[in-house]
Image (tube, helix red, strand yellow):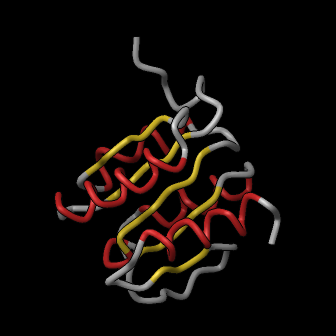
Amino acid sequence: MKKTTAETARCFVIVEPDPIVSLDLSGILGTAFKDAALMICRDFAEAEQHITDAVSSVCVLLNSNMAASGILPLLRDLVARGGEVMFIGDAYDVDFPAYFVQKPFTSEMILTSLTGRMQGN
């Protein structure tokens, strides 16, 4: 049985329309965090329920080009509940704590950011 966002110790919600980029991200995260659940969503509509139901163990990785959509209020609420947000691509002005990783990214860039965040840096 597949674990839901609320049932797993660590979950990553990848919101990325490009299947190659989402596969790269899921490969990086799946290798580094073997027990984590990975949710791959191509758009906001797919990701919305995962984000709404999310608990503090969730990290959303979002294509920064999608940040202008109605997802920002959900991300703000997620962060207020203890979740994390990482934008992949150009920096975007948001009013909540978030991290940014530029494209093209490397495994090291993604993991360095995640490791720093998980350690409270």
Front position in the image: 40 or 113: 113
Query: Which residue is found at the position 50% from the left and 56% from the top?
Result: 60
Q: Residue furthest right?
A: 120
Please state, as top left, top right, bottom left or bottom right, where the N terminus lies in the image.
top left
Q: Is 73 positioned to the left or the right of 69 in the image?
A: right
Q: Which percent across, then down, holds residue 80?
A: 73, 56
Seen from the viewer's position, the closer of residues 90 and 95 is 90
| Quadrant in the picture for residue 90 | bottom left
Q: How far across and down, in percent of the image, does residue 29 sit?
A: 46, 52
Give the image location of residue 102, x and y in percent: 42, 85
7 versus 31 height, above or below: above
Q: Quadrant of residue 62?
A: bottom left
The residue positioned 34% from the left and 84% from the top of the image is 103
Residue drawn at the location 59% of the way across and 23% of the way down: 7
The C terminus lies in which quarter of the figure? bottom right
Position in image of residue 96 (x %, y %): 67, 73
Looking at the image, the residue that sits furthest to the left is 19
As drawn, is 52 to the left or to the right of 24? right
In the figure, 46 relative to 42: above or below?
Answer: above
- Count of numbered badges drawn on the protein: 0
Compared across the picture, whether 14 is left or right of 33 comes to left
